[in-house]
Amino acid sequence: MPAIVGVIMGSKSDWETMKHTCTVLEQFEIAYEKKVVSAHRTPELMFTYAEEARGNGIKVIIAGAGGAAHLPGMVAAKTILPVIGVPVQSQALNGLDSLLSIVQMPGGVPVATVAIGKAGAINAGLLAAQILATADAELAGKLEVRRETTRAEVLESSDELV
Ligand code: RP5
């Protein structure tokens, strides 16, 4: 199946975080591609990827980066696809640098920014699924089931407080 979600990250070192996004996409059987695309080390590739993604059938881009995390914003500048930014937890500043680099976009070029690290990576996958589910009833049904499962797990968890 051709990819409809593009998962990109600034470095191979971001994979530990971004693999959680891919796991969610796999759980929902969403076809995706994953690629290292660096804003600073491969800027030409970044622009080409962003410019061609829509024509290649991609519907949502998820971009993870850490530190001076310019990848999500620069990709968003070059496409009208929805871009979800995942702030990777950096060593020096614990990901606050990544978060602020991604979230503080100027008006006119949005990046949907999720939480720092693993929780954000998981939510990026879920948010992409929810965006796609606006035009996919089967996927919407799967999301409803997951919410119900999560709800049931929380309700049952009180019994585990021993
Ligand atoms: C960013 O710099 C990447 O997104 C990564 O989070 C960070 C560090 O990259 P490496 O030095 O580990 O390749 O561009």
Image (cartoon, grey):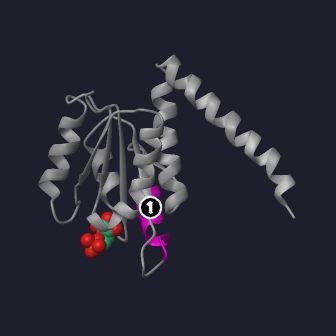
Q: Quadrant of ligand 1?
A: bottom left
Of residues 58 and 3, the one nearer the viewer is 3
The image shows residue 9, relative to residue 68, as above or below, that is above
Q: Is residue 95 magenta?
A: yes
Of residues 44 and 134, the one nearer the viewer is 134
For image coordinates 37% across by 71% down, the residue present is 67
Q: What segment is highlighted magenta in the picture?
A: 94-104
Residue 12 shows in the view: yes
Type of secondary structure dominating the magenta stretch: helix
Q: Quadrant of the N terminus?
A: top left
Q: Quadrant of the C terminus?
A: bottom right
State the image coordinates of residue 116 (x, y, percent, origin top left): 51, 62
Q: Secondary structure at mark 1?
A: strand
Of residues 146 and 44, the one nearer the viewer is 146
- In the current view of this chain or complex, which residue is farthest to the bottom? 92
**78 lies left or right of 108:** left
Amino acid tagged 1 = Pro
Q: Is residue 160 magenta?
A: no
The image shows residue 133, relative to residue 90, as above or below, that is above
Q: Quadrant of residue 86?
A: bottom left
Q: Which residue is mark 1?
A: 87
For image coordinates 42% across by 82% down, the residue present is 92
The image shows residue 156, relative to residue 70, as above or below, that is above
